[in-house]
Structures are given as C-alpha cells and as structure tokens.
Image (spheres, coloured by chain):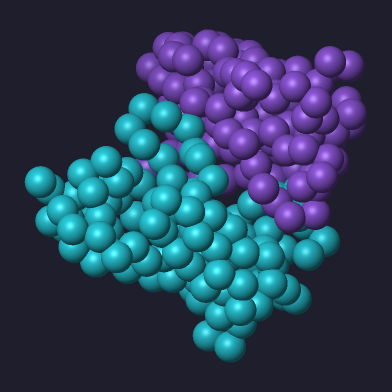
Chain colours: A purple, B cyan
Amino acid sequence: KAGVTQTPRYLIKTRGQQVTLSCSPISGHRSVSWYQQTPGQGLQFLFEYFSETQRNKGNFPGRFSGRQFSNSRSEMNVSTLELGDSALYLCASRSDQARNTGELFFGEGSRLTVL
Amino acid sequence: GNSVTQMEGPVTLSEEAFLTINCTYTATGYPSLFWYVQYPGEGLQLLLKATKADDKGSNKGFEATYRKETTSFHLEKGSVQVSDSAVYFCALSAPGSARQLTFGSGTQLTVLP
C-alpha cells in the first residue's frame, strides 16, 4: 500500500511569489491535514480537509489556503511568500477508523526555501 | 489550550544505554497521546500511542505509559541502538479536536556506537 506522497520535495522561491504543494493520501483515506515544521516554531497545524471540505484551520494568515479534490488529493497554496514561510510542509492522512484517535500517516514533506 | 512539553535536547547516548525522554501535557478531558519519530530527511512516523489512562503503548522496544495523575507520557527504551538516532515528538489529540495534533518541540537523540 503506497504511503502519503508529497510533491515537490524541494523548491526555492523568492519573496512575493506564490507556491502550490501537492499531497496524495494513502488510498482510501479521506482526511488530509497539513502541518508546517520550522526550527523555531516546531510543528504547527495548518488545516484539515475531509471529503473536499475544510474541517479545521490553524492560526495562520489568509495567505495560506488549501483545497481537496474528489479523489482526496489535496493542495495547499501560499501566496505573497515571506522569508518566514521557509519550512518543511508536511501532509498527513488519516483513515476513517482513526478519526477519533488522532493517528496520522505523514508524507516526507515539501521543503520550501524563500529567498 | 492544549500543550505538550518535552524534555530539551539534544540527547546523546552510547549504544545499549537506557533512554528516557520526558513528556508532559496540558489538555481538557482525556486526550489520546502519541510518540512520533522523524528520521533524517523523512516525514514523521507513528512510534506508539495510548488512548486512555494507564494504557501502555509499545513498539520496537520503546514504551510509554499514559499517566493521568501526572499528565505524563514519558518515552523509554531499555537498550538503544545507533539506528534509533532521530528526532522524537510527543503529541496529543484532545477530545473534540481529534482532527488536530498538538506537538511538543521534539527531542534530538543521537546514539553513538
């Protein structure tokens, strides 16, 4: 069974640009969450999608957005990039059976560098 | 709000040493508790979990017991290996917000041969 797949793995952008990251969850998982990982702030929750609907959102500015498609694949977008957006962006999926326990399966992440 | 406090790292041990990484939490109700591990260049992997008080999670020789009275979930391993070198994260999901994990800051473990 394939795991969570994130693309691209690495990317470099400049301030003011925008970026789109993609995530394919484990087959059959309808819930996809996104986390930002930085050395200073650690792992912070961005948002969660389930069946194309955003169910929960973390404390991030509106420049951070996401969506989920009917095949459960998800994308997140960051507009007007700032230096502080440099981070590892992790996607995670969850099975319906684990919806109340918090157990997540993570991808390897997309490392974004903003210059 | 919910929070997780982890032992500050980095931690450096010799192979076959005993490992303890402390984790305490603050949450309303009875959260589920997790330890995730992140190997270099990889995403997070679930190491073990416990969903109610006094539960013991275990995997790959690692153990952690859910202690409600001390709000703790300390990670232990009796004999570490070089391959255990990684960053370890304690996390919780609280009732009513099970879709969101709250993570500790992570503890870098290095095991020397």
Q: Is residue A68 left or right of residue A1?
A: right
- On the image, the x and y values in percent for residue A11 come to 45, 12
From the viewer's perspective, is residue A26 above or below residue B35?
above
**Residue A74 seen anywhere in this rendered image of the structure:** no
Residue B26 falls in which quadrant of the image? bottom right
- On the image, the x and y values in percent for residue B12 come to 17, 56
Q: Quadrant of the C terminus of chain A?
A: top left
Q: Quadrant of the N terminus of chain A?
A: top right
**Which residue is painted at 13% across and 56% down in the image?**
B14
**Which residue is painted at 37% across and 42% down in the image?**
A39
From the viewer's perspective, is residue B19 above or below residue A110?
below
| Total numbered labels placed on residues in the image | 0
Q: Nearer the viewer, residue B87 or A89?
A: B87
Q: Is residue A31 left or right of residue B42?
A: right
Residue B27 falls in which quadrant of the image? bottom right
- On the image, the x and y values in percent for residue A37 come to 48, 38
Q: Nearer the viewer, residue B29 or B46?
A: B46
Q: Residue furthest bottom?
A: B69
Q: Is residue A106 left or right of residue A76?
A: left
**Which residue is painted at 88% across and 16% down in the image?**
A70
**Which residue is painted at 50% across and 49% down in the image?**
B47
**Residue B44 seen anywhere in this rendered image of the structure:** yes
- On the image, the x and y values in percent for residue A105 come to 62, 36
